[in-house]
Image (cartoon, grey):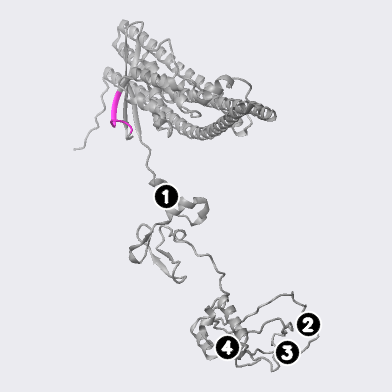
Amino acid sequence: MSTGASPTLANLDLETDGASPWGDERSINTSTPPISLPHDDPTDAFRGPGSKAKESTQNKDTGDPSPQPSTRTSAARRNPRRPGRHVARIEAIDDDLGPLGPLGDNFNDNINTALAAKPRYDSPPEPPQKEDSPRMARAIPGAPNRMSLTGDSMDTVPLDDSGAEVHEGGYRRPPATDFAQIVGIEALGESLPPPKPAGDQPASPSFEIHVGDPHKVGDLTSAHTVYQVQTKTTSKAYRNSEFTVSRRYRDFLWLYQALINNNSGVVVPPPPEKQAVGRFDDNFVESRRAALERMLNKTAAHPMLQHDPDLKLFLESEALSGDIKHKEKQVQPVGENKGMFGSLGGAFGGGGKFIENDEWFLDRKHYLDNLESQLKALLKSVDTVIKQRKDLADAANDFSSSLQALSTVELSKSLSNPLESLSYLQIRIKELHERQAQQDVLTLGITVEEYIRIIGSIKLAFNQRQKAFHTCHAAGGELDKRRATFEKLQRQGKTQQDRLTQMSAEVSDSEKKLHAARVAFDNMGRTLRAELDRFEREKVEDFKSAVETFLESSVEAQKELIELWETYLMQLDREEDEESGYRPVETPTSA
């Protein structure tokens, strides 16, 4: 083999006999064509295999001499190759390090120059990666710059204020928020920007509702109490920010029932209980007014109930009775079947016994039962205290009347005047006890009664969840029946193809109903959990406020009572001094 065929291969430093420095041997198969060495023409590296095959054919036709295979033998010969034509070619490659790589020391000047100009890294090169599309290379909002995909790995791309890349020519790449919508948030992981704080979210509308001016209207047979409901709100759903309407007690009952029907699983604040005897008593009317006001404010503060259209109708309508009738006429054709719960729950809702399997709900039921018993016992004690205060007021009134009668028959002014003053003092004490009794009703008593009613509303929500379970169970039973009928028709063959198609559609419809029933049951459970958590928070706040107000009113009443007695004692001392002609002794002054 000639060593001057190519300057690139001249540096290989082959042995004189043609042996390879790597220890391999040439094949002795005479059918192997000669190895055509590359020429100095640099364009050979870009020639295709077809052109090289054509050139080889031309050399064979012209009879160019080719080197003969060597007759050197070796003890370690390769296994015989498969018969056939094996073409092995050597092509020139633009390799800066040469064929030996960094192992050899005989580098030519061109290689040394290339290595000196190109920096060397101690770490191995990174594996090739698939080029990302421009859409996959969006910037994270909030970062000042980021790496470019087209330039060097450390090049940065300027970003505008919105987080979009700004390239030459005015091209602006959109920020990464659109990419999150395309591939999904889960696919991005920690590369997404943090969510916006809660302060950036729009605030819920505020409501301030006052129920006042209770007055009796109607004749003896249709007498009832009417209240003025004044509302101030920031909600844009209402026509005005301030408005006042007239409502009676049964309108509040309608609102409560409408909210329960519209919001399954939600604990709706209930109105006070209906009372037939003494409903026009001033104390009863005042306590009912306060309870109705608390009901409306709690309802308007609820995040779900404040958006209910029936609440808007109640607070805003000038003719509520007519609007309710008009609404019922519009909803009646659609609501005859009462939706999914009406079609299935109406027939199966009350059937079967419901066994609670969720430990959380089971514990809450026991807790609510115990809480209701304790609150009822507390309400009974509060009623006893209120009754005792009223009895004490009545006793003070009787005592005052007796003192007044005695003062009129007494001839001595030194005795009649103190008796008359004491009679007047007992009248003040009587008024104080009556006011304190009413204050106990409006602070502690009304709170205890309210939460007893709220527990009743929670039990209604539990019953709704129970009906949802029965609806889900009924939908599952109906699906099993239709599947059994469908499988029976399938076994009968194609004789009833129309019936088979119809049953297939019914099975699909039953599956949809079962899925909807399960989703409704699960959603109702989650809603009830959130409602019970809200109930616990509000209960602590309301009872804390009620107890504080109860204690403050009791302290103020006792201070007022002490002041009355001290004033009476001072009056007695003054009258006694006047009657005895007591004058302070004058001390002599020195001249």
Q: In terms of secondary structure, what is the magenta stretch mainly?
A: loop
Q: Which residue is mark 2?
A: 77
- The Cα atoms of the two marked residues, 3 and 4, are separated by 23 Å
Which of marks 3 and 2 precedes in the sequence?
3
Q: Which residue is mark 4?
A: 8
**Residue 309 location (% of width, % of height):** 38, 28
Closer to the camera in the image, 78 or 399? 78
What numbered label is drawn on residue 565?
none
- The Cα atoms of the two marked residues, 1 and 4, are separated by 64 Å
Residue at the right extreme of this rendering: 75
Q: Which residue is mark 1?
A: 196
Instruction: Name which quarter of the figure residue 403 lies in.
Output: top left
Closer to the camera in the image, 373 or 487? 487
**Residue 483 location (% of width, % of height):** 64, 29
What numbered label is drawn on residue 70?
3
Rate crowding at label 1 as few (under 14), some (14 to 19) or many (20 or more) other CA atoms within 10 Å. few
Which of marks 4 and 1 precedes in the sequence?
4
The three-letter code of the residue at mark 2 reads Arg
The three-letter code of the residue at mark 1 reads Lys
Q: Which residues are magenta?
A: 237-244
- The Cα atoms of the two marked residues, 1 and 3, are separated by 80 Å
Q: Secondary structure at mark 1?
A: loop
Q: Quadrant of the C terminus?
A: top left
Rate crowding at label 3 as few (under 14), some (14 to 19) or many (20 or more) other CA atoms within 10 Å. few
Decide whether residue 239 is among the magenta residues. yes
Residue 169 relative to residue 356: left or right: left
Asked whether residue 305 appears in the rendered view, the answer is: yes
